Image: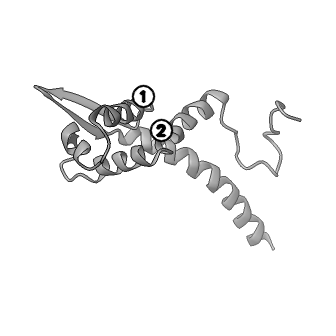
């Protein structure tokens, strides 16, 4: 039935403890921010920069969209916690928030590991 919680103690459960509604909302915000191809490329450009940060002009130069459009995408990535920014004089520099992305990866890993660990244990018992 929709709206009923999943049984936590069931052997069929994919996780020891399912995420809370707040955790699901938080994770979905990151996925929503990264689901746009332009935002995903922006995050990739920033993450792959050897200096660890990129200014707005360098990001905008990689796209054939207007500056305000790039600013909008950067704002969405900041709101989701994927990127952070720092103003220096007339420039704004963007950098990835590794703790935020690490938390997302951790959630996904926990979901996948719980099931694969159960499968390995079951196959070893045979």
Of residues 91 and 122, the one nearer the viewer is 91
Q: Are marks 2 and 1 in contact (CB under 8 Å)?
A: yes
Residue that appears at 80% across and 33% down: 5
What residue does disc 2 label? 33
What residue does disc 1 label? 79
Q: Measured from the top left, where is residue 91 in percent x and y?
A: 15, 31
Splitting the image into 4 quarters, where does residue 2 fall?
A: top right
Question: Callout 2 environment at 10 Å: few (<14), some (14 to 19), or many (20+)?
Answer: many
Q: Measured from the top left, where is residue 113 in percent x and y?
A: 62, 56
Task: Compute the Cα span from label 2 to label 1.
Answer: 9 Å
Residue that appears at 25% across and 44% down: 59
Task: Say what secondary structure mark 1 lies in.
Answer: helix
Residue that appears at 20% across and 53% down: 50
Report the side of 26 relative to 94 (left or right): right
Task: Say what secondary structure mark 2 lies in.
Answer: helix
Q: Is residue 90 above or below residue 19?
A: above
């Amino acid at each position: 039935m929709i709206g009923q919680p999943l049984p936590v103690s069931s052997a069929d459960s994919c996780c020891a403890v399912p995420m809370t509604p707040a955790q699901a909302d938080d994770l979905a915000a990151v996925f929503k921010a990264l689901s746009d191809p332009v935002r995903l490329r922006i995050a990739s450009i920033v993450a792959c920069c050897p200096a660890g940060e990129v200014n707005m002009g360098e990001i905008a130069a990689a796209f054939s969209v207007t500056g305000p459009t790039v600013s909008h995408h950067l704002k969405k990535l900041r709101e989701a916690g994927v990127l952070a920014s720092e103003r220096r004089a007339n420039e704004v520099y963007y950098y990835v928030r590794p703790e935020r992305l690490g938390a997302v990866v951790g959630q996904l890993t926990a979901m996948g590991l719980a099931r694969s660990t159960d499968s390995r244990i079951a196959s070893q018992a045979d």
